[in-house]
Amino acid sequence: MKTKYGIQLASAALWVGGCLIAGLACAQGKPKVVIGYEDNGADPYMVSMAEHMFERHMNADVDYKLFSSGPAAMSALASNSLSFMCGLGVPPLVTAIAQGLPMTIVYNQERYTNAAGIVVKPESGIHDVAGLQGKKIAIVAGSQASFELATFLAQAHVPYTSVTQINMAPPQMRTSWVTGAIDAAIVWDPVFSALREAGGKAIKTDGDLPRNASSYNVCIANADWAKAHPDLVKGFVAALDEGYQVTQKDPDKAIAEMAKQTGVTVPVAKSELAGYELFSGADQTTPKVMGSGAGVKTSATYETLVNTAKVLNQIGRIQTVPSSFEANVAPQYSQSLAH
C-alpha cells in the first residue's frame, strides 16, 4: 500500500511456511529482528548490544544496522525492513507521522542536556544566537536539529530564513569545519564534542530546551508491527532497561563497552554519556517520559511531539499538524517494568 505521499508501506504480517516475513523472518526457529541505530555517542543500548541482551530477552536472531541520521532510516521502517530504530530524534518521527506512516515510540531513551547544541568557530565573530544572522550553519535537515535551530532562533527573535543552512551528515561537518566552509554547526555527540575539542564554542545546548519541547533520543517501531508482536516489543524494551541498569550499577564496565562500540576513549565516552538525562524502563510510564493511560496526553514525550509538529509546520517541513499523537506514544510495552 502507498500513502498519499507515495511512500511504500509493507503489510504488517505475512505468513509463509510457518514463518512471518515482511518485517520478521525466521532463522533456525527464531524470529529475525533488525535493530537500526545512529551514532549518538556513548549510550546504554550499546551495553544491551554488547552483552546480547536483545537476543536473550526477545529469544530472537538479531541484526544491527547503523544509519547516518534519522531521516535516512524512515524508509526502511516504513517498508518493515527494520523492526526497531533507536537513537532517533523526534522531528523525523513527527515528519513520518504527518505523512501518514504508523510509527510509534516504544521507549524514550534519554533527553539531551549537554550532548548536543550549537557550536561556533571563535573566528566567526558569533557570540550568541543573534550572531547567527547572515552566517552559515551546518545541519542535518529534517533531524532534531531543525526543530532545535528554529526554537533557538525564535527565542532570540532571529528570522529563520536569515541563517544559511547547509545540509550535511555529522561526519562531513568535521571536514567543513576545518576547511572554513561553515561558521557554525548544530549537531549531537560525538561530533558536537569533537568540534568543541577543535576549539569551537557552544552557544546553546539542548539542556536549554524545556522538557515538553525538548530533544530526545527515542526507539520506535511500526505501530501495526508492534501490535502484532507485543512479546517481541516487550522483550526489546526489557533489554534496553537492562542496559540502563548495568550502566547505573557498574558504570565503569558499561562505559568501557560503550567506548569500544563507538571507537573512542573511555574519558570521551564518559563525557558523552554525561550529556544525557537517561531513562529507565520504570521511567517510561511516568509523566516526565510517556505517562500512562489518560496521562499520556500530558506527558513530556507527547507534548514534545505536539510542539515539534507546530515548529516543523511553521518552518515548512510538514504541511499539517497531526490532530493527535495517541497512536504514536506506546508506554504499554513498559508497563511490567513500572515500580
Image (spheres, helix red, strand yellow):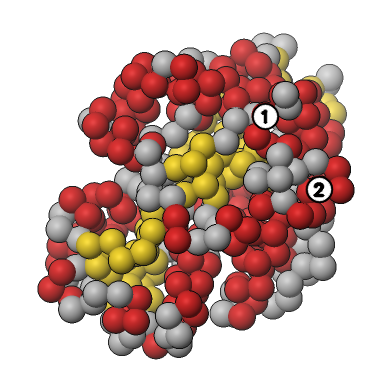
Which quadrant: the N terminus?
bottom right
The residue under the point 51% across, 37% down is 278
Tell me, yes or no, if residue 225 can be seen here.
no
* Label placed on residue 295: 2
Q: Is the residue marked by circle 1 packed among few (<14), some (14-19), or many (20+) residues within 10 Å?
A: some
Q: Which residue is mark 1?
A: 282
User: Is 294 in front, or is 1?
Assistant: 294
Which quadrant: the C terminus?
top right
The residue under the point 60% across, 25% down is 241
User: Is 121 in front, or is 214?
Assistant: 214
Residue 113 appears left or right of 220: left
Decide: is 152 above or below 93: below
Q: Amino acid at mark 2?
A: Gly
Q: Is the residue marked by circle 2 packed among few (<14), some (14-19), or many (20+) residues within 10 Å?
A: few
Q: How many marks?
A: 2
Q: Amino acid at mark 1?
A: Ala
In whole angstroms, how far apart are the C-alphas of marks 2 and 1? Answer: 15 Å
Provide residue 34's location: percent of width, then percent of height.
Answer: 60, 32
The image quadrant that residue 16 belongs to is top right
User: Is 105 in front, or is 213?
Assistant: 213
The image quadrant that residue 338 belongs to is top right
Provide residue 111's location: percent of width, then percent of height.
Answer: 52, 47
Label 1's element?
helix
User: Is 159 in front, or is 54?
Assistant: 159
Decide: is 280 above or below 221: above
The residue under the point 26% across, 36% down is 268
- Compare marks 2 and 1 and give the one earlier in the sequence: 1
Provide residue 31's location: percent of width, then percent of height.
Answer: 70, 21
Residue 305 appears left or right of 295: left
Residue 215 appears left or right of 337: left
